[in-house]
Image: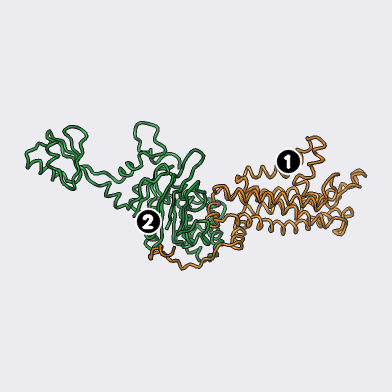
Amino acid sequence: MTTTVPPEKYVSRLAVEPVNERRVLTSEWLKLTTLRSSWITMALGIGALAFLGGVIGFFTNQQWDRLRPARQAAFDAVGASLGGVRFAELAIGVLGVLFVTGEYGTGMIRSSLTAVPRRFPVLWAKALVFGLVTLVLSEIAAFIGFFIGQAALGTHGVALSSDGALRAVVGTGLYLTVVAVIGVALGFIIRSTAGGIAALVGILLVLPGVMLILPQTWQDNIGPYLPSTAGAALYDLHPEAGSLDPWTGFAVFCLYAVAGLIAAAFVLHRRDA
Amino acid sequence: MIQAYGLTKRYGEKTAVDHLDFTVRPGIVTGFLGPNGAGKSTTMRMILGLDRPTSGSVTVDGKAYADLLAPLHEVGALLEARSVHTGRSAYNHLRVLAATHGIAASRVREVIDLVGLRDVARRRAGGFSLGMGQRLGIAATLLGDPATLILDEPVNGLDPDGILWIRNLLKGLAAEGRTVFVSSHLMSEMALTAEHLIVIGKGRLIADLPIAEMIGAASRASVLVRSPEAARLRDLLAGPDVSTTSQEVGELVVVGLTAPQIGDIAAAHGIAIHELTPHRASLEDAFMKLTNDSIEFHGGTTVDTGLASTGGAA
């Protein structure tokens, strides 16, 4: 083809490197950290996970003598200190959706995809960057939440060495990481912020409630395999009867995320931007 | 160099772009002209790999856009629709794009200065005026110092200063040997910037010609002559470069001779002249004539408001 290029063709002297996965990761890291909404939403979710357990622990400790003996016996000290996980899940999932739909809503996606026309690296990089950020922050927050929570519970608290406690704390961070990835995948699949958040809330928070109005056999057979229920098996030390084993449940939850990513890749590849 | 081969885009029943073949050459500004809804934006999005052609293909310097290893270094694009996250500052927007190509922060500052956004570079792009947004778009276009530039309606919404600035910028970029492909729905704008024109209507190629030729065709003067002896005069005026047409008895439209020349010939042969009117078609007329059959959204009234070609959807 070089023979057909006219001699007067412009030659740039700017130092430019080919697009690769590492550079797209850097770009996505910059995208995440240069938006105020990222910081606010992340702070809300992480803050809830780190400090809500302390609040729950403090009031539980105060009210302990008024609890019935049965409640006292069934008390889940680990679960109480990690009580912020539902808020963190919502905030992190929403931020994952926004990380993608914010680009579609503003048109930024057209800039992103003209810079990275192979497209897939944008998806992997977004999932990886946001997943890793969530993993690090939520693990830290889960440990903070556990220790503050147990301290606030005083004599009713348990040690990290108690049965399953470490798994629950670490598992909370892992669970939230998968939620983050699911949020990103939903963003790519649905593209609109309102629709993406509705889908996220519907799948993670509403679906388990819907199961309760279905026949008992359905609840028993399907219920444990719902995404958030399966994932919760990893950090919930007092699971309902019929729940999946902790790591089996988490593996099922991860499969949902993988399925979401595959669907996202398919949509990203096929549809016009 | 941009080359399109049978480029076609269909949305269900509707054909937005219909078997376009064209070549955009380096070193000059090439105008991409057509009424709103003609398929200009769709064509540009297909060049950039944002929209997938239904059939046909388009290449930049012989490669499909998606196969470019450092696309921002080879092609800079300004799309008509905004393509900037409103929550990010101008500086960070460019840094995000630069990071994908390992482009240094010094280059980011360079293009910010070039487009005159230094004072507002740290402000959120969501608060930018149309003109500032367009300048940020141009900065992103130039970021990778590309050899090919694709700009969709770059002067839309700009004040006269901004329009002049873009015109000169585009001419300067082309003079450096770059390929510059600019769309517009305004013939007058193209006449001032472009050297070559690709005209489309309803997704089809209408014309692909140097602007000088278009202007030549448009400004070829004709003369309307009324005379009781029109038939005799017609024979007398006949010559190799002269064409005459007649739409009604006693009337001639002459191309190739000036009004004084016709008057002199008539006088020399004693032929009475009742009317002798020189007529010069404007560039806008030439464009209207070219695209008249292919305007997507005609005005709803029979009175010509002059808005038929500029209104309607993008």
Q: Position of residue B129 (x, y in %)?
A: 47, 50
Q: B288 or B233, which is in the foreground?
A: B233
Q: Colour of chain A?
A: orange
Mark 2, chain letter?
A: B
Label 2 close to label 1 by CB (< 8 Å): no
Q: Nearer the viewer, mark 2 or mark 1?
A: 2
**Which label was assigned to residue B29?**
2
What residue lies at 60% left-to-right and 44% top-to-bottom? A192
A111 over B288 or under it: above or below: below
Q: CA distance from mark 2 to mark 1?
A: 57 Å
- Location of the N terminus of chain B by quadrant is bottom left
What residue lies at 76% left-to-right and 44% top-to-bottom? A226
**Which label was assigned to residue A206?**
1
Question: Element under label 2?
Answer: strand
Q: A255 or A89, which is in the foreground?
A: A255
Q: B116 or A174, which is in the foreground?
A: A174
A183 over B177 or under it: above or below: above
